[in-house]
Amino acid sequence: MRIKPIAVTAVALLALTSCGTAENPPATPSDKNGAEASTDRPATLSPDAKAGIRAAAGLPDDPDAKTRQAYLDALDAIDARIIKPGKEDQAVSRGINQCGSIKNVKDEAKLAQTALERFTVDTRLPDIANPTTGEAINKAAHTHLCPSF
Protein backbone atom coordinates (compact mmCIF):
# COMPACT_ATOMS: atom_id res chain seq x y z
CA MET A 1 0.00 0.00 0.00
CA ARG A 2 1.36 3.43 -0.95
CA ILE A 3 0.88 6.30 1.49
CA LYS A 4 0.06 9.56 -0.22
CA PRO A 5 2.28 12.57 0.56
CA ILE A 6 -0.70 14.58 1.81
CA ALA A 7 -1.49 11.87 4.39
CA VAL A 8 2.13 11.89 5.53
CA THR A 9 2.00 15.67 5.75
CA ALA A 10 -1.16 15.59 7.84
CA VAL A 11 0.34 13.09 10.28
CA ALA A 12 3.57 15.06 10.51
CA LEU A 13 1.74 18.32 11.12
CA LEU A 14 -0.37 16.72 13.83
CA ALA A 15 2.82 15.58 15.49
CA LEU A 16 4.36 19.04 15.19
CA THR A 17 1.32 20.91 16.49
CA SER A 18 0.83 18.58 19.45
CA CYS A 19 4.34 19.21 20.75
CA GLY A 20 4.95 21.70 23.49
CA THR A 21 7.92 23.67 24.77
CA ALA A 22 9.48 24.10 28.17
CA GLU A 23 7.40 27.24 28.67
CA ASN A 24 4.21 25.71 27.24
CA PRO A 25 4.18 21.91 27.66
CA PRO A 26 1.57 19.81 25.89
CA ALA A 27 -1.48 18.83 27.86
CA THR A 28 -0.98 15.59 29.73
CA PRO A 29 -3.75 13.08 29.13
CA SER A 30 -5.42 11.55 32.14
CA ASP A 31 -6.89 8.13 32.72
CA LYS A 32 -10.55 7.56 33.56
CA ASN A 33 -9.85 8.19 37.27
CA GLY A 34 -8.27 11.59 36.61
CA ALA A 35 -4.68 10.49 37.20
CA GLU A 36 -2.14 11.78 34.71
CA ALA A 37 -1.09 9.26 32.11
CA SER A 38 2.54 9.03 31.04
CA THR A 39 3.60 10.23 27.61
CA ASP A 40 6.96 9.10 26.30
CA ARG A 41 7.37 11.54 23.43
CA PRO A 42 9.83 14.43 23.23
CA ALA A 43 8.56 17.91 24.01
CA THR A 44 9.96 19.35 20.77
CA LEU A 45 11.39 18.12 17.49
CA SER A 46 14.94 18.93 16.55
CA PRO A 47 15.46 21.00 13.39
CA ASP A 48 16.92 17.89 11.71
CA ALA A 49 13.86 15.81 12.62
CA LYS A 50 11.55 18.54 11.35
CA ALA A 51 13.52 18.78 8.10
CA GLY A 52 13.34 15.00 7.70
CA ILE A 53 9.57 15.01 8.11
CA ARG A 54 9.22 17.80 5.58
CA ALA A 55 11.49 16.04 3.10
CA ALA A 56 9.53 12.80 3.47
CA ALA A 57 6.31 14.71 2.86
CA GLY A 58 7.79 16.53 -0.13
CA LEU A 59 7.51 19.96 1.46
CA PRO A 60 10.04 22.77 1.01
CA ASP A 61 12.41 23.93 3.74
CA ASP A 62 11.79 27.09 5.75
CA PRO A 63 12.48 30.15 3.60
CA ASP A 64 15.39 32.47 4.29
CA ALA A 65 14.56 35.86 5.85
CA LYS A 66 14.36 37.72 2.54
CA THR A 67 12.12 35.12 0.89
CA ARG A 68 9.94 34.88 4.00
CA GLN A 69 9.36 38.63 4.00
CA ALA A 70 8.58 38.68 0.27
CA TYR A 71 5.99 35.94 0.84
CA LEU A 72 4.41 37.78 3.78
CA ASP A 73 4.35 41.00 1.71
CA ALA A 74 2.63 39.12 -1.11
CA LEU A 75 -0.08 37.91 1.29
CA ASP A 76 -0.48 41.44 2.65
CA ALA A 77 -0.89 42.74 -0.91
CA ILE A 78 -3.82 40.35 -1.39
CA ASP A 79 -5.45 41.47 1.87
CA ALA A 80 -3.73 42.55 5.09
CA ARG A 81 -6.21 40.50 7.13
CA ILE A 82 -5.05 37.14 5.73
CA ILE A 83 -2.14 37.08 8.19
CA LYS A 84 -3.56 37.20 11.68
CA PRO A 85 -1.85 39.84 13.87
CA GLY A 86 1.34 38.40 15.34
CA LYS A 87 0.91 35.10 13.44
CA GLU A 88 3.50 35.50 10.68
CA ASP A 89 5.06 32.11 11.54
CA GLN A 90 1.62 30.50 11.18
CA ALA A 91 1.17 32.09 7.76
CA VAL A 92 4.56 30.75 6.64
CA SER A 93 3.75 27.28 7.97
CA ARG A 94 0.40 27.29 6.19
CA GLY A 95 2.09 28.43 3.00
CA ILE A 96 4.59 25.58 3.21
CA ASN A 97 1.71 23.16 3.72
CA GLN A 98 -0.10 24.69 0.77
CA CYS A 99 2.99 23.90 -1.30
CA GLY A 100 2.24 20.24 -0.66
CA SER A 101 -1.19 20.76 -2.15
CA ILE A 102 0.25 22.74 -5.06
CA LYS A 103 2.57 19.84 -5.77
CA ASN A 104 -0.11 17.14 -5.60
CA VAL A 105 -3.48 18.68 -6.55
CA LYS A 106 -3.97 19.50 -10.22
CA ASP A 107 -7.55 20.78 -10.00
CA GLU A 108 -7.13 24.58 -9.82
CA ALA A 109 -10.59 25.17 -8.33
CA LYS A 110 -9.98 22.63 -5.57
CA LEU A 111 -6.53 24.08 -4.96
CA ALA A 112 -7.97 27.59 -4.58
CA GLN A 113 -10.59 26.29 -2.13
CA THR A 114 -7.91 24.47 -0.16
CA ALA A 115 -5.98 27.73 0.20
CA LEU A 116 -9.07 29.55 1.47
CA GLU A 117 -9.68 26.81 4.03
CA ARG A 118 -6.04 26.44 5.09
CA PHE A 119 -5.73 30.17 5.76
CA THR A 120 -9.24 30.25 7.31
CA VAL A 121 -10.29 32.94 4.84
CA ASP A 122 -13.51 31.02 4.20
CA THR A 123 -14.59 31.40 7.85
CA ARG A 124 -12.88 34.59 8.99
CA LEU A 125 -13.11 36.73 5.87
CA PRO A 126 -16.20 35.75 3.92
CA ASP A 127 -16.11 39.01 1.96
CA ILE A 128 -12.92 37.87 0.17
CA ALA A 129 -13.53 34.10 0.26
CA ASN A 130 -13.63 33.54 -3.49
CA PRO A 131 -11.59 31.68 -6.10
CA THR A 132 -9.62 34.80 -7.02
CA THR A 133 -8.31 35.14 -3.46
CA GLY A 134 -7.51 31.43 -3.26
CA GLU A 135 -5.61 31.61 -6.54
CA ALA A 136 -3.69 34.66 -5.31
CA ILE A 137 -2.68 32.85 -2.10
CA ASN A 138 -1.52 29.89 -4.18
CA LYS A 139 0.50 32.19 -6.43
CA ALA A 140 2.17 33.81 -3.40
CA ALA A 141 3.09 30.43 -1.90
CA HIS A 142 4.23 28.99 -5.22
CA THR A 143 6.29 32.03 -6.18
CA HIS A 144 8.06 32.49 -2.86
CA LEU A 145 8.02 29.18 -0.99
CA CYS A 146 8.03 26.45 -3.61
CA PRO A 147 8.88 27.81 -7.07
CA SER A 148 10.13 24.40 -8.21
CA PHE A 149 6.70 22.78 -7.73
Image (cartoon, rainbow, N blue to C red):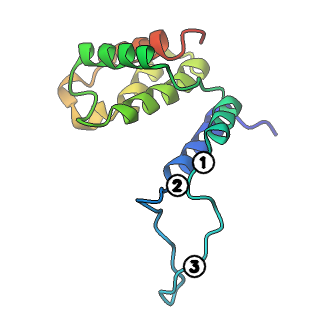
Which residue is painted at 63% across and 32% down in the image?
54
Which residue is painted at 48% across and 13% down in the image?
142
Q: Is residue 36 above or below residue 87?
A: below
Which residue is painted at 59% across and 12% down in the image?
149
Front: mark 1 or 2: 1
Find disc 2 in the rendering and name its residue: 19
Find residue 108 and report its horizontal and vertical position in percent.
47, 14
* The label number, if any, that marks residue 37 in the structure image: 3
Please, what is the three-letter code of the amino acid marked with disc 3?
Ala
Q: Quadrant of residue 52?
A: top right
* The label number, if any, that marks residue 45 in the structure image: 1
Cα–Cα gap, marks 1 and 2: 8 Å
* The label number, if any, that marks residue 142 in the structure image: none
Find residue 27 and report its horizontal and vertical position in percent.
46, 67
Q: Is residue 7 visible?
A: no
Q: Secondary structure at mark 1?
A: loop
Find residue 30 and report its horizontal and vertical position in percent.
51, 79
- Where, quadrant-wise, is the N terminus in this rendering? top right
Check if mark 1's residue and mark 2's residue have beta carbons within 8 Å. Answer: yes
Mark 3 closeness class: few <14, some 14–19, many ≥20 residues within 10 Å: few
Q: Secondary structure at mark 3?
A: loop
Q: Is residue 24 above or below residue 68?
A: below
Mark 2 closeness class: few <14, some 14–19, many ≥20 residues within 10 Å: some
